[in-house]
Amino acid sequence: MRVWRLGLASRVLAGLLIGVMAVAVVMFFVWTDGDLRVALAIAVPYGLLAFLLWRRTFHPRLSAGPEGLTLRREWRTIRVPWSAVVRCDAGYDGITIICADGSWVVAPGPQKSNLSRWLGRKTQADDVAAYLERRAREHQQEIEASGMPGE
């Protein structure tokens, strides 16, 4: 099983931002002389923002296992069997996986910056997309060689 997440820089910056938000709430609480209503008025929105940032940055991942892909997004998990994978393209939003039925899903990471795309640079996202396509082809060839009907 191979797993990919958002970039380390994104996760570090998000962690720092969540930490700064927590310190700001504590400092505001101290500054207001312990008035709980005012502190909660600040802590609740900051807590909600921190939770959403954590969900957006630390929760998503792309996993490649023996049965296929697992795309864990912010709020749901999508499973794509190898037999359904036709093409994978690296982009700014993540890796776009085009399925045999014409549908597509976007894996949350790794991502390819627009600058890398414009300059024609090869990135980790390109390597992952190529790996996923290769694994899908290998799986489909194994199915054909074994004479088993497709999934």
Image (cartoon, rainbow, N blue to C red):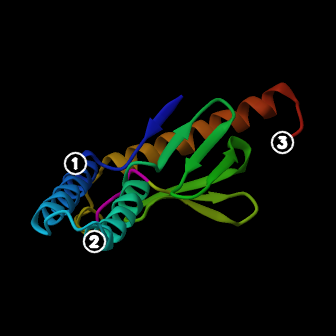
Mark 3 vs mark 1: give the one in front: 1
Residue 50 horizontal/vertical position (percent): 33, 60
Identify the residue at horizontal 25%, vertical 50% (top origin). Answer: 15
Provide the secondary structure element on which disc 3 rests: loop
**Residue 75 magenta-highlighted:** no
Q: Amino acid at mark 3?
A: Glu
| Residue 42 image label | 2
Question: Which residue has dot 1 on it?
Answer: 12
Q: Which residues are magenta?
A: 109-113
Q: CA distance from mark 3 to mark 2?
A: 52 Å
Q: Tell me if mark 2 has few (under 14), some (14-19) or many (20+) residues whose alpha carbon lies within 10 angstroms of its own.
A: some
In the image, taking residue 9 as reference, residue 41 lies left or right, namely: right
The residue shown at (21%, 58%) is: 17
Looking at the rendering, which quadrant does residue 90 occupy? Answer: bottom left
Give the number of the mark in front: 1 or 2.
2
Q: Residue at x 46, y 36 (%)?
A: 3
SS of the residue under disc 1: helix
Badge nearest the viewer, 3 or 2 = 2
Are there few (<14), some (14-19), or many (20+) residues within 10 Å of tag 3? few
Residue 151: mark: 3
